[in-house]
Image (cartoon, rainbow, N blue to C red):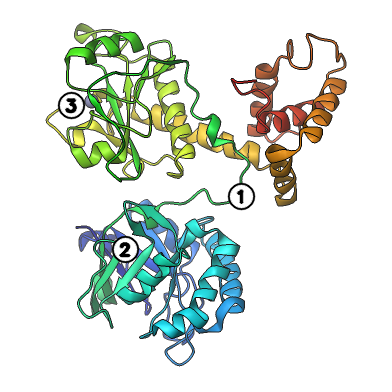
Amino acid sequence: MATVIDFSAAFPKAADIKAAGHAGVVAYISPARETWMKAKPITKSVVDAYRSAGLKIATVWQYGGASNPDAMRGAAGGKADALAADAALTNAGLTGHPLYFAVDFDITLQQWNNTAVKYFKAACDVLGRQRVGIYGHSRAVAWAQEDGVVADIGGGRCLGWVTHSWSQGETGSGYAALYQGTHNVPGPSGVQVDVNTVYDNYPFTAQTTKETTVDVSALPHVDQTLWLNKHYTTGRGGQAIKYIVRHHNAGMLTTQGCWDVWQSREASAHYQVEQSGRIGQLVRDTDTAWHAANLLRNQQSIGIEHANSAGPDQDWPISDATITAGGKLAAELCLKHGLGRPEFGVNIRDHKETGSTACPYHLASGGKYHAAWMKAAQDHYDTILQEDDMFTDEDRALLRQIRDNTADCRSMLMALSAQNMGDPAIGGPFGGWPHDQIMATVREKIAAGKELTNTEQLHVILDKLGFYDKEN
Ligand SMILES: [Zn+2]
């Protein structure tokens, strides 16, 4: 299993960490308590150096020592530390990342129940539970999981980092994300380090935990559904969706064409992107498609097939429309399932990692279509969230209220929107409004940093309220 190191005396060089075979680091994001702690907190320049070397970065907050543990300050301490950690993450270029809060002493159940659990609840209130993790002995991590005060990362695991200390041999392998099994040994660049086993990729992925009004229930955009009747498995065997697996058809198929092939071939995928960019869905996200030649990977992933635009005589090309639509589909799935910004090796992977195949061929990492596909995915993901950035937290609270229950507010907004369009009589309240065109302009303007007109702002609001969803 992959390993990551943590350290407090100094920052090992990125190249030395790589050379030692570690996948990344867990860095302190809290300030130094003692002058010798030169690696507290991690800085933006170190983050940049580690990232450009391809190292993964998770962070931990631990300021107090054994005599004054952070978590024993209860709710007030949890709130203060979470706010400070959030600001420190932003300073370090890690905006929105999850982090571990350390419980670095032999905490008792009574201390947990009376005080420490309140520290974690307060941190969840500030950051959102999906960004809160715990470092501690095996029982403390299990208590935090039971009490629901740390992130649930799927598959029965929480964002927990179990330390060897006080854990009496329990390693958390069934429910934690990390295990610190080796303490204080000489490491890369001559720095003393702890070595940790990685059970799960989650702590290294930036989370979309900022409050958002993006209505994920309307995602992803699909042009056609054609549900398969065989060759997939209902449910996901208790596994959570963690990533997308890319395929190409090695064929020039439509959605119907895939359906036909999978009648006799014991295979399936969730989505097919046709040559025109048209998207078909054949297996529900909640079910397991048979596409990755590996049971666990199938249970943890969503398979996207891409049609080729010509055959082997032209070396299986793929159209620009298919590449763009495939990337966008992946972005919407990442948003819908909380997988974070599309990143290859984290939430985007290739079929050829499992099974003896070249699939997805030119789309695969290192292939000629890979960069364009990833750019389409990341740009689309950013655009959806940028639209959301126009709103303050107060706006969002108001929008949620409107969305959730107030028919009066909805009709008021509709009337307002009609007035702003200048002609309330055009085809009834919605018909005839060039909503898609207006939203396309909105996206261009946002991307260019231009201000929106009142009409455009209203369209964004109405869009967020679901007025233009298919059922309306
Ligand atoms: Zn494939």
Q: Nearer the viewer, residue 434 or 467?
A: 467
The residue type indicated by label 3 comes to Ala
Percent coordinates x, y for residue 396 in the rendering: 70, 46
Q: What residue type is labelled 1?
A: Glu
Q: Which residue is drawn at 28% across and 83% down?
A: 166
Marks 3 and 2: CB-CB under 8 Å? no
The outermost residue toward the left is 356
Residue 211 numbered tag:
1
**Closer to the camera: disc 3 or disc 1?**
1
Q: Where is residue 471 in the image (x, y as percent from the top left)?
A: 60, 21
Visible residue check, residue 90 = yes
Among the 4 quarters of the image, the one containing residue 343: top left
Q: In the displayed structure, does residue 448 sit left or right of residue 30?
A: right
**Labels in figure, total:** 3
Q: Residue 199 carries which label?
A: none
**Classed neighbour count for the residue bearing mark 1: other residues with Cα under 10 Å, few (<14), some (14–19), many (≥20):** some
Whether residue 453 is visible: no
- Residue 330's spot in the image, x, y percent? 42, 31
Q: Is residue 248 above or below residue 21?
A: above
- Mark 2 lies on a secondary structure that is loop
Q: What residue type is labelled 2?
A: Ala
Give the residue pinned by disc 3.
358
Q: Is residue 324 above or below residue 433?
A: below
Name the N-terminal-most of marks 2 and 1.
Answer: 2
| Residues packed near mark 3 inside 10 Å, few (<14), some (14 to 19) or many (20 plus) | some
Percent from the top left, x then y, of residue 462?
A: 72, 29
Cα separation between marks 3 and 2: 34 Å
Q: Which residue shows up at 26% across the image and 17% down it? A: 249
Image quadrant containing the C terminus = top right
Q: Mark 2 — residue?
A: 176
